[in-house]
Image (spheres, rainbow, N blue to C red):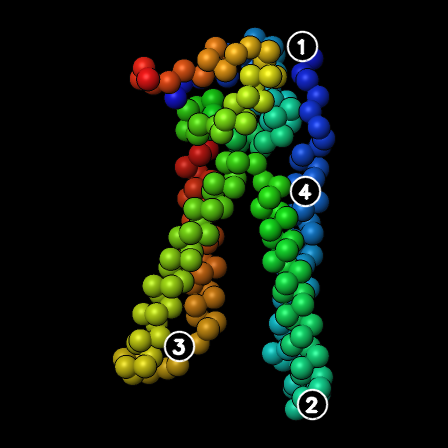
Amino acid sequence: MKNRLKVLRAERDWTQADLAKALEVSRQTVNAIETGKYDPSLPLAFKISWLFEMPIENIFQADTAP
Amino acid sequence: MSNIKETSGDWQKRARIKIIQLAIWTGFWVITVAAAAFGPLLWGENNLINILVILLNLGVGIGMIIANINHLKNLDELMQKVQLEAMGISLGVAIVGGITFSMLDTTNVIPFDAEIGGLVALIGITYLISVYINVRRYK
């Protein structure tokens, strides 16, 4: 799954540590999501969506069409 | 920097507290294991004291398990995944390795007894290596 987390975070001038604190996860988890090594659970994806105030599909995109 | 929304609480602080609690319980447990194992050298074969120390060891062990559960529950989802995989591998190695080790003993292939300490060491080493590899994998 692809995501725009790094771009969205950079637009807001947040560090990985800032985002990790807001999401209540470790900085390593934020990094793993940004680099595509880990896909977040649905609750965490919703939390990210809430934090960036945009729909999930604007942040995460499937690699292949469903 | 634009403001970031506040969430429920300081997760990192809570995680640190859980780790400290687990370390304290583990430290106490190691002390009670040492007391149960080497205590009889001090107080001799006093059954009452030995039973009390072993019961204390069991009680502190249960406390350590509960502290570990609380620590795991407080981890974020990626770290829980890392821990789950490491524990799964450790359990598999413990069962397969333990039975192999036991059979080597019962068939007298090895010239010494298959002690539980060897199995505990194997589980510990497997767990540490698994956690290290998994953490590296998601870096």
Label 3 and label 2: CA atoms lie apart by 28 Å
Above or below B3: residue B61? below
Q: Does residue B50 appear in this view? A: yes
Give the residue type that dot 3 points to. Answer: Ala
Q: Is residue A59 above or below residue B48?
A: above
Q: Observer-nearest residue: B73 or B34? A: B73
Please tell me how crowded label 4 is: few (under 14), some (14-19), or many (20+) other residues with Cα within 10 Å: few
Looking at numbered disc 1 in the image, what kind of residue is underneath it? Answer: Ser
Task: Name the residue beneath numbered marker 2.
Answer: B46
Q: Is residue A17 visible?
A: no
At horizontal 46% and vertical 65% (from top left) the residue drawn is B121
Element type at marker 3? loop
Q: Are marks 3 and 2 on the same chain?
A: yes
- Residue picked out by circle 4: B16
Residue at the image position 57 percent from the left and 29 percent from the top: A27
Distance (Cα) linking label 3 and label 1: 62 Å
The alpha-carbon separation of the residues under discs 2 and 1 comes to 68 Å
Mark-to-mark CA distance, 4 and 3: 38 Å
Mark carried by residue B114: 3
Q: Earlier in the sequence, mark 4 or mark 2?
A: 4
What number is the disc on residue B2? Answer: 1
Label whose residue precedes the other's in the sequence (3 or 2)? 2
Q: Return the x and y of residue B16 as percentages of the image width and height.
A: 68, 42
Please, is residue B43 above or below residue B95 in the view? Answer: below
Q: Where residue B48 appears, x then y in whole percent?
A: 71, 86
Q: Residue at x 46, y 73 (%)?
A: B116
Q: Amino acid at mark 2?
A: Asn
Q: Residues within 10 Å of mark 1 (few under 14, many from 20)?
A: few
